[in-house]
Amino acid sequence: MKKTIILLLFILGFSIKVNAEINRIVSGQDDAKITIIAYESLTCSFCADFHNKIYPLLKKEFIDTGLVKIEFRHFPLDIIALNASKISQCKQDQSLEVMMSLYSDQQAWIKGKTIEEANENLEKFVANKNFNLDFEKCISDKKIEDFVLNDRIEGTKKFKINSTPTIIINGKKFEKTLNYKNLKKSLEKLI
């Protein structure tokens, strides 16, 4: 009995530690030859276009084949983007799914004349998608907020980012017009 309790406490302690850690939202294999960092704001329509039009092609041709890994980093342009970023980071086992859903149905939650209205729309959206998140807990989580804001600070300092989406490929800023054709050409040069 004593060993069972110790084992249970160890498992619970380990679970708490794992759940307390905030991980980046990533698509692809860790050992991919090419790493893309995408700095984005969840309220940015160009970022939504990237997710809805370019990312599926990138995923099929480069990510699913193991050549590319993409890390999504936060660069919120307004308070509702900050709150949406916190929502996307709140439940680690479904972060990519939550983020992709926020981009694919951006117009469903992005509206509101005040931050309170916008938050209500975001909360309804999350509830309708059955993500099983505690909305208030997620948007008031200081650790997640710091994580999101540190992404923005790092992007500004390290890569001089001032707009979204901004793509970094293997540590270098992608300076061409962001479309799949240009991105594909740049990636093919690195393979």
Image (spheres, grey):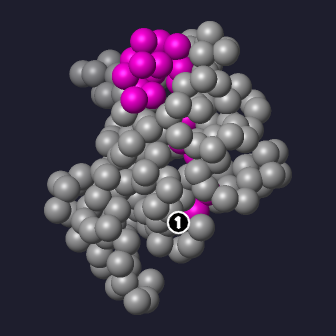
Q: Depth check: 13 or 169 in front?
A: 169
Is 129 inside the magenta-drawn segment?
no
Per the image, the residue denoted by label 1 is 82
Residue 43 percent location from the top left of the image = 47, 65
**Residue 112 spot, x, y in % from top left:** 37, 84
Residue 79 position (above or below residue 151): below
Residue 10 visible? The answer is no
Q: Is residue 65 magenta?
A: yes
Q: Is residue 173 visible?
A: yes
Image side of residue 117 versus residue 22, left or right: left
Which residue is at 73% across, 49% downward?
155
Which residue: 43% across, 89% down?
A: 114
- Residue at 58% across, 43% down: 178
Q: Which residue is drawn at 46% across and 46% down?
A: 50
Image-based side of 132 in relation to 81, left or right: left
Label 1: state its secondary structure.
helix
The relative height of residue 105 versus residue 184 in the rendered view (above or below) is: below
Q: Percent x, y for residue 52?
A: 36, 45
Left or right: 190 as drawn, with respect to 86? right
